Amino acid sequence: MQQANIIKGIAVLFMLYHHLLAFPERIPNESALQLESLGWAGIVATYFKVCVPLFFFLSGYAMGIKNDKKLTSYFIRIKTFYKSYCFYFIIWTLIGFIFFSNSIVPGTSILIFDFEPLAYVLGFLALNSTYNPEAWFAEIYIYLLLFTPFLLRISTPYLLSLSFGLFCISFVLMKSNIVFPFTGGIDFFYWQISYVLGILVSRMKDNNWGIKLESNKFIYFIAINIFCLFLGVFIGKNILVFITPVIVLSFVILNIKKSSFLSISLSFFGRLSLPIWLIHPFYCYYFFSGFIYSIPNGLLAYIVLVTLSTFTAYILNKINQLLISNYKKQA
């Protein structure tokens, strides 16, 4: 559990760096921070999109380890997810509608807090990301949970073939004009392979991957990630969904000591990964983007974003837990 939280902590820190520095079109025109001057920092930020397949991979791995084939179990998981997601959705939309009604989607002229009843209901159910474009992940996660009992029943060769086939179909659909009845259809076909790879790795007899390296662990970790970075640069971002297990392997090799400060810190970020993921876009893009991007140094801007997002996530998470606890006592 702690190792999973450590990797989730790393992934969510990757996500904040990715969203802050990988999109030149999202930076306000008056910004003091210019991506053109970042050099390799911008390239690394683009590579950190691997945070998405990392989260899917870890989710698939956890479901594979549990190997629970009852659909009712996944309805319970979705209910638990909603208890957190809906709380944050209400918070950010209320603040947005009241105080930031003129905020626009970065790089466009579209108002993000333009109230539409249907969009709001779908957003509340995590089936639409109109009021937080960076929350698209939630819809795909819900679909994956619903399909998990079916996926767990498929043997490894057929599951791998099915997953790769759906991944290829996603490219065909991207170039077509087919409209899906649910908005995340193509994204579901594209990202499911990371989730399936997690399930497949969980079926390996040695879940520790047989890694017993006692020396030069950090060098191996850096070398693997530099190799993956170059693959992403020269082959393209689509390779990231396939090399995710290799990146996870680098974290396993690193084998951070459980009692170390680094382990405790990353586990802390990992436990707060959901609220940090849902909250940080509003500091980065919608509520205080002028402040974040007024900081001329990319690393300093990143530290400020992480600090503000984590502090807010910690406070709101405590409030949410208190509300859930009081509700259970009264029920």
Image (spheres, rainbow, N blue to C red):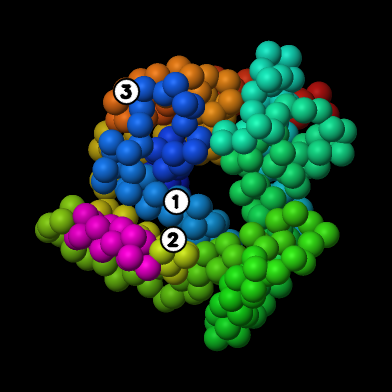
Q: Which of 27/302 is in front? A: 27
- Pick out the residue farthest to the right: 117
In the rendered image, the quadrant that contains the C terminus is top right
Q: Between disc 2 and disc 1, whose residue precedes?
A: 1
Q: Residue at x 50, y 52 (%)?
A: 52
Q: Which residues are magenta?
A: 220-235
Q: Are marks 2 and 1 in contact (CB under 8 Å)?
A: yes
Distance from the alpha carbon under mark 1 to that under mark 3:
23 Å
Q: Between disc 1 and disc 3, whose residue precedes?
A: 1
Q: Residues within 10 Å of mark 1 (few under 14, many from 20)?
A: many
Q: Between disc 2 and disc 3, whose residue precedes?
A: 2
Q: Are marks 2 and 3 in contact (CB under 8 Å)?
A: no
Q: Horizontal and vertical percent for residue 188? A: 66, 62
Distance from the alpha carbon under mark 2 to that under mark 3:
28 Å
Q: Is residue 328 above or below residue 122?
A: above
Residue assigned mark 2: 237
Is residue 197 visible in this depiction of the protein? yes
Q: Is residue 259 left or right of residue 55?
A: left
Q: Using the image, tell me which numbered label, if any, was put on residue 49.
A: 1
Q: Using the image, tell me which numbered label, if any, was put on residue 296.
A: 3
**In the image, residue 222 lies in the stretch drawn in magenta:** yes
Q: Horizontal and vertical percent for residue 206? A: 38, 72
Q: Which of 286/146 is in front? A: 286
Q: Residue at x 81, y 38 (%)?
A: 119
**In the image, residue 257 lies in the stretch drawn in magenta:** no
